[in-house]
């Protein structure tokens, strides 16, 4: 072998080494970017913002990573309350016609729905027969559809666009798996926070505010009404003959009456009114923006009528009633505990002759 051939062979060998080195350096930079991105996702998880806002920040972070061969378009879907569909909660650069078609999709529908069912990453280099949703004017492209999973459940899907004909890489796949895992952690954390909130502030049986939340709401209404010099009423509601039915037929019947009674009160009240369960068969209501005590008494009477209709439970027809005590801000008191106490005092009088609404009157 002459010197020229040896030199060419050495140059070729060195070129291969340089190429291998450059590829290694590129992968190291990419993996460093992955770690930086995951750290940023961790920071996003600690932000005191809504889950939808967190998902939006993560989507924008992913779409702006330079070496990811993405088309700067995509969206995040979260599993809906039914557990059988996906709701798009954030998106970027998607057309209006596509958004209308993809705002909610069922499991198994199109690529995102298929990824939700299979719980595996679905990659497409182009549009094909599995693209069930094809809005008018759609252009050629590919997709990454990464399911967001936790404990065997699909929490959502990360949908990203790639250029037509794109060839996926291991680094991209690793990054998307890591991102989906981080997103799952954020979603689970939010679910725990929501559950803790419900336990702390909502009545477990009826789903309406409990005493803690009610007092918080009442304090806020007092401040707002005081500033605006508005009148409002506090209604203390007690279900008549409830204990008798609960003792006779059991807690299952009693609980169902409480649920139905809550629904009846909600249907009888305005959207601006607040209803809460203090415990047992005792409820309280804030009637905002009333023009006079007479108006509060009219609404209280309407509630008694609604609560007094028969309840159908397991083919049985059961009858209860209601008594209500009413206090008025600022006529009777300007503090939350005092307003509640005076409504309770009026209720005590109303229960002496059941089925009435009594307005608190200052004793001489």
Image (cartoon, helix red, strand yellow):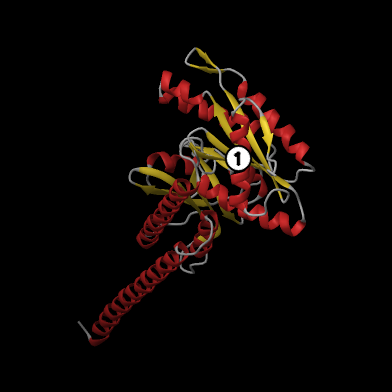
Quadrant, the C terminus: top right
Give x and y (percent) for residue 280: 48, 34
Give x and y (percent) for residue 239: 55, 28
Give x and y (percent) for residue 266: 63, 34
Is residue 310 depicted above or below 278 in this figure? above
Q: Which residue, as the protein is rendered here, is positioned at the far left?
A: 1
- Under circle 1, the secondary element is helix
Q: In this rendering, does residue 127 appear at all? A: no
Q: Which residue is mark 1?
A: 345
Camera-side residue: 83 or 161?
Answer: 83
- Left or right: where 332 falls relative to 131: right
Q: Residue at x 58, y 51 (%)?
A: 337
Camera-side residue: 304 or 253?
Answer: 304
Quadrant, the N terminus: bottom left
Camera-side residue: 285 or 157?
Answer: 285
Is residue 307 depicted above or below 46 in this figure? above
Q: In this rendering, does residue 255 appear at all? A: yes
- Left or right: where 221 falls relative to 189: right
**Quarter-of-image position of residue 72:** bottom right
**Quarter-of-image position of residue 71:** bottom right
């Amino acid at each position: 072998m002459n010197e020229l051939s040896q030199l060419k062979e050495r140059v070729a060998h060195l070129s291969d080494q340089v190429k291998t080195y450059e590829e290694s350096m590129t992968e190291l930079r990419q993996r460093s970017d992955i770690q930086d991105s995951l750290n940023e996702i961790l920071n996003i998880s600690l932000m005191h913002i809504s889950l939808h806002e967190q998902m939006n920040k993560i989507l924008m972070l992913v779409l702006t990573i330079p070496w990811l061969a993405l088309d700067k378009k995509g969206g995040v879907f979260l599993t809906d309350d039914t557990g059988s569909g996906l709701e798009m909660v954030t998106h970027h650069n998607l057309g209006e016609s596509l958004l209308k078609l993809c705002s909610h999709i069922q499991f198994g529908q199109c690529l995102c729905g298929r990824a939700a069912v299979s719980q595996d990453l679905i990659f497409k280099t182009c549009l094909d027969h599995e693209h069930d949703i094809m809005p008018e004017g759609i252009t050629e492209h590919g997709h990454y559809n990464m399911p967001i999973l936790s404990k065997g459940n699909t929490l959502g899907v990360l949908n990203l666009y790639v250029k037509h004909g794109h060839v996926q890489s291991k680094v991209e796949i690793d990054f998307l798996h890591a991102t989906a895992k981080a997103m799952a952690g954020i979603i689970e954390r939010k679910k725990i926070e929501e559950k803790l909130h419900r336990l702390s502030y909502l009545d477990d049986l009826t789903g309406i505010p409990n005493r803690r939340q009610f007092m918080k709401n009442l304090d806020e209404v007092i401040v707002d009404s005081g500033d605006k010099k508005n009148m409002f009423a506090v209604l203390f509601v007690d279900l008549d003959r409830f204990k008798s039915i609960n003792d006779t037929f059991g807690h299952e019947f009693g609980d169902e009456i409480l649920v139905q009674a809550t629904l009846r009160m909600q249907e009888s009240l305005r959207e601006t009114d607040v209803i809460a369960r203090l415990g047992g068969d005792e409820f309280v209501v804030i009637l905002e923006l009333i023009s006079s005590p007479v108006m509060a008494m009219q609404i209280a009477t309407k509630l008694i009528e609604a609560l007094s209709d028969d309840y159908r439970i397991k083919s049985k027809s059961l009858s209860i009633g209601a008594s209500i005590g009413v206090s008025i801000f600022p006529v009777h008191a300007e503090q939350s505990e005092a307003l509640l106490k005076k409504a309770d005092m009026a209720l005590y009088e109303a229960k002496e002759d059941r089925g009435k609404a009594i307005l608190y009157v200052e004793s001489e």
